[in-house]
Amino acid sequence: MPDQTLAVSKICCIGAGYVGGPTMAMIAHKCPHIDVKVVDINADRIAQWNSDQLPVYEPGLDDIVQQCRGKNLSFTTAIDDSIRAADMVFISVNTPTKMFGVGAGRAANLEFVEKCARRIAEVSEGHKIVVEKSTLPVRTAEAVKRILANSDNAATFDVLSNPEFLAEGTAIEDLLAPDRVLIGGERAEAIEALVSVYANWVSRDRLLTTNLWSSELSKLTANAFLAQRVSSINAISALCEATEADVDEVASAIGTDSRIGPKFLKASVGFGGSCFQKDILNLVYLCEYFGLPQVAEYWEQVVKMNDYQKQRFVTRMVRTMFNTVSDKKIGIWGFAFKKDTNDTRESAAIYVCRDLLLEKARLCIYDPQVSREHILRDLRSIFTEGDGVISDAKQKLIDEHVSFASSCEEASADAHAIAVLTEWDEFADADFDAIFDSMKKPAFVFDGRNKLKAMDLQGKGFEYHGIGF
Ligand SMILES: NC(=O)c1ccc[n+]([C@@H]2O[C@H](COP(=O)([O-])OP(=O)(O)OC[C@H]3O[C@@H](n4cnc5c(N)ncnc54)[C@H](O)[C@@H]3O)[C@@H](O)[C@H]2O)c1
Ligand SMILES: O=c1ccn([C@@H]2O[C@H](COP(=O)(O)OP(=O)(O)O[C@H]3O[C@H](CO)[C@@H](O)[C@H](O)[C@H]3O)[C@@H](O)[C@H]2O)c(=O)[nH]1
């Protein structure tokens, strides 16, 4: 293994997803001296990255990609060549919850990460730094190192952990000015090589270095703490509804305590996204695996509270609407798991729509960034049985009860109720007088984000229900 400083001039990132794409675009943007190749087995996704319609909607991303693409940033399916040419290889593939076999429903599925490690071992020559960018269970680097040790070409490797903390919708600001960049590793030279990449735009005091295992575990822990705050305030929102307290007032009152802080205290219909639930379940699995059932149970409650919050929202809708929503049109405002993203993974909207469909409501869905095909795919998949097949009855339910609109006004026309499920800013600019006129009366609004709370909808004639008041 070389002792001299490891210079990085060529990077390959395996996985052109919500993390690999934006993260590598930022490295290319800030490090013009580094050639960055993002590779993926999904040829359609690579084609989209090479088109004007990027697969990831993220404010500010298009500009950066356009500036760098064709210069020092490229997207390609030439995986082996790109790995071979690189000094540093990031693994940024998906690590979803495993849905089969040992640990089903909890453990992370590491199949894709392992395949990457095997590919790297097979095609590499000389020395490479392999960086875990995917979110991984603590001690995964041990397995990665063992696989790499069996390289066909006697290549040598350093393995680093560099978990990503960006949030979707603010990925570019988060990457530009991260609270910290975490790098875990064993050999100082390898750690310094990655530090020197980030040091092109991140100040050194924000570049934290730890051992491999602390770095891997910090990522799961950060997400568990963040999600715990959301579940905690959501739990309090239920108590607020029963007591005439207002959860937003409670949140700002407790948030002024500098020990608590104001962020991540927004009560909602429930957290979504590809990370929180998956990573907490992974933490729960790890705790059970290491013989810590009390710790596992403690964290699992964060997910259970989130499930309760989503169910509670639908129950409240049904009860308020005279105990039936059957054959009633409901305008669904927003389907993404949060604003400013086209991502719907684990979106609360999927579960709310499923439960409303099971109540036989007619849904008219509008989201400014999520396509109709994508929404239909999500709904089909939530109704799919274990064997991967959707029953005729469920398919009929979707076919006959789901329609789409091109604006929130259109989604609400002739509706009995509106359900706000994503906090898109444009919703606050809707023409509420026209919407009220076009709706059945009473005109119910169920605001799962408290997005319209300040709009005095009650004063305009609506019956307005938010979260936690
Ligand atoms: N989405 C986020 O905001 C976020 C933030 C921080 C960390 N993470 C973590 O980053 C990782 C990636 O997440 P994502 O949201 O970018 O996932 P994603 O599903 O959007 O992208 C993963 C990509 O990897 C590709 N891939 C899978 N196996 C491959 C292989 N063997 N060779 C080449 N390509 C392969 C897939 O085709 C896919 O395009 C996950 O571990 C996730 O937990 C995600
Ligand atoms: O006060 C809050 C904050 C968030 N949410 C919801 O929580 C979910 C997650 O939001 P957010 O954390 O902003 O987005 P993600 O893109 O899922 O980012 C999280 O997950 C990523 C993947 O691991 C991490 O990198 C980020 O640091 C972490 O914030 C969304 O449904 C939000 O609507 C609330 O309901 N209330």
Image (spheres, rainbow, N blue to C red):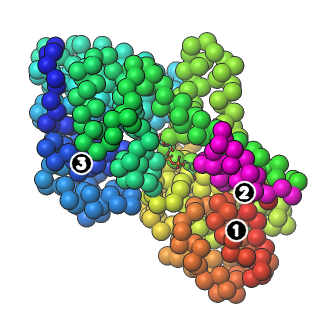
Residue annotated with mark 1: 453
Q: Is residue 429 above or below residue 31?
A: below
For mark 2, does the 10 Å Cα neighbourhood hold few (<14), some (14 to 19), or many (20 or more) residues?
some
The amino acid at mark 1 is Lys
The residue carrying pointer 1 sits among few (fewer than 14), some (14 to 19) or many (20 or more) residues within 10 Å by Cα, namely: some
The residue where tag 3 is placed is 30
Q: Is residue 68 rendered to the left or right of residue 146?
A: left
Please report contact status of discs 2 and 1: CB closer than 8 Å, yes or no: yes
Q: Residue at x 32, y 58 (%)?
A: 61
Q: Which mark is residue 196?
A: none
287 relative to 72, above or below? above
Looking at the picture, which amino acid does disc 3 mark? Lys
Q: Residue at x 27, y 62 (%)?
A: 63
Q: Is residue 87 visible?
A: yes
For residue 397, what is the image quadrant?
Answer: bottom right
| Residue matched to label 2 | 248
Judging depth in this view, the residue of 429 and 275 nearest the camera is 429
Residue 231 appears anywhere in the view? no
Of residue 446 and residue 229, the one placed in the foreground of this image is: 229
Kindly state the secondary structure of the residue where label 3 is placed: helix
